[in-house]
Every structure is written in structure tokens, then in C-alpha cells.
Image (cartoon, helix red, strand yellow):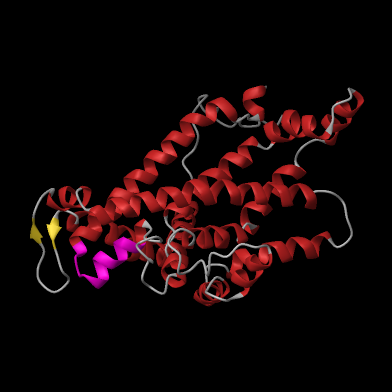
Amino acid sequence: MTLVKEAPVRPAGKRSAPPAAGRRGRRRENLAGFLFMSPWIAGFLLLTAGPMIASLYYAFTSYNLFTPPKWVGLDNFTTMFQDPRWQKSVEVTLKYVVVATPLKLLLALGVALLLAQKRRGEGLYRAAFYLPSLIGASVSVGFVWRALFSDDAVVDRTQKIFGVDVGGWIGNPDYVLYSLVALSIWQFGAPMVIFLAGLKQVPRELYEAAEVDGAGPLRRFWNITLPMISPVLFFNVLLESIHAFQVFGSAYVVSDTRCGPADATLVYTCYLYQKGFKEAQMGFASAMAWTLVVAVALVTAVLFWSQKKWVHYEEAAK
């Protein structure tokens, strides 16, 4: 009779240690991963984290780029809050955000609703509407926009046909900011694509059931479409609001680097640029930059707090 030796029974819950070769293999994989990530890590530390930490220090110093920074405490912030031009830049920026962001999102949602319907050549339409978002931030578009809204240009001549004679918008302090708003609205392609993706996720059965109950288009939009795409709407509101607070290139180029006339396009970042690089007050500019960071963080916090009242998630509904 052959005796078979039974294998020893391991205690429950205990696992054998992995072989040394496996541990070495995982270390090599981790090392390879860190090597591939090293360019990004170096870029983040040198180009993002490092400058941010330095600017936080400069915000409490008097620094003109040519002499060593001198610690002044909260003087930059005190001077900033008492500066009439800083107050003007805050006013102009808030006006731009409040006007441009809702109009841009309304147009993006309207076009997305049209493109969500099955039609011939819908891919071409989507590409055409998205194209301005790719080129809208370029300097060349800013020059073209300034030419369009100058005296006796296309916009000026067109409005005269309808009996409106206010001259070119660029030279008019009452209208020049709205030319920047128009440029922002023209770049509605990015939020439109996001809205379109959200609309594609709405179940068709909900619309069919609403039609059976006699709901019209407006009621279906208000009771079905808006609640279903509210997470996408929240994302677009958040993203576009942050972008609007950071507007710089269009205001700087369209106003011919003057942020005017009469400081009419003196958005926050434009004044920050003037103080930091034209007047060499880098400490003051750093204080402005961190004030903007805090302001945007507060706006973001308010939006996240408010989403509990109007954003509907599927998981929460379940």
C-alpha cells in the first residue's frame, strides 16, 4: 500500500509571502512608472507649484524684479483694496462674468438641442460650431475682432442700416466690453459639446411617456431635459465661470493693450499684468493673483453648495 504524504494545511487568513522575483518585478514596474511620470512631475514642481509658492511669498513683499524682495506684511493687500483702479477692475470683471457666462451657456445649450436631433450632415455641423473654440483664444482672432468692431467697420455699418448710430464699439466706453462678451459667446463650442453628450444620455422612453401624457415641448424640456442634464449644466457653469474670471487675452488685444478706453475693459487680469510687468510691482501683482485665487475658490464653493438644490444625480435618486 502506497502512503501519500498530505500537504501541510496553512492557517486560515495567512498567505505565503510573494517570491523575491515577484517583488523585484513590481519594483521595476513602479520605477518605470515613475520614470514615465517624471517629466510631468518636474514640470509641475518647476512651472506650477514652485511659482505659486514664490508668488505667495512675494505677495507679502515689496518686489520690483530688480532688487531683492523686502517684507512688508499686509501692505500690498491694504493698498490694493484702497486702489480705485483695482476696484474698477473688480467691477468690470464681475460685469463680464455675469453677462458673458449665462449668454454663452444659453447659446451652447440651444445649439446642442438642435444638434441632438437626427439630421443629415450633423457631424459637419458639430465641427463647424466647435471650431471657434479652438481658434478663439488666438491673438490673430483678437485683431480681427478689433477690426470688426472699429469705427466704420462691418458692425458699425450694419447697425447704421437699422438706424443705430453709436460708432465703433472699440472706441466707445459704453459698448467696448460687450464686444468682449460677443467674442466669448462666439466661442460656445466647448460647452456645446458637453451639453450634447449629456443630451445623448437622456432616455428616449421619458419623452415618449411625456408625449403620451400630453406634455408639450416646453414642458418636456423643463421637467425632463433640464433635470436629467443638470449635472452637465453644473459642470459647464462651474468651468465657464472660472474661465470668465481669468479672461485676459481678448481684453488685452481688442483694446490695443490699453484695457480701455476709460478702463472700460480693465478686467482683473489685465490690471494685474499692468502692475506686475509694466510697472514692475511684482509684490502687488502677486497679492492680486492670490486674491483672485481666493475669490474663485469662494465662487466654486458657493456653486458646490448650491448644487444640492438644483442638481439631480441618478445615484441620489435611487
Q: Is residue 285 magenta?
A: no
Q: Quadrant of residue 186?
A: bottom right
Query: Left or right: where does residue 71 sit relative to residue 182?
Result: left
| Picture coordinates of residue 155, whole percent (x, y) | 61, 69
The overriding secondary structure of the stretch rendered in magenta is: helix
Write down the quadrant of residue 53 in the picture.
bottom left
- Above or below for 157 versus 180: below
Res 148 seen here: yes
Of the 4 image quadrants, the one containing the C terminus is top right
Q: Position of residue 102 (x, y in %)?
A: 57, 46
Q: Report the number of numbered marks.
A: 0
Measured from the top left, where is residue 150 in percent x and y?
Answer: 52, 73
User: Residue placed farthest to the right in the image?
Assistant: 212
Q: Quadrant of the N terminus?
A: top right
Magenta-tinted stretch: 270-282
Regarding residue 19, the answer to whether it shows in the image is no
Taking depth in this image into account, of 193 and 128 the one nearest to the observer is 128
Name above or below for residue 126 compared with residue 305.
below
In terms of depth relative to the viewer, which is nearer, 41 or 197? 197
**Residue found 20% across the figure and 58% down from its top:** 284
Foreground pick, 231 / 30: 231
- 12 horizontally vs 130: left or right: left
| Residue 12 to residue 23: above or below | above
For residue 171, above or below residue 25: below
Q: Position of residue 214 (x, y in %)?
A: 89, 25
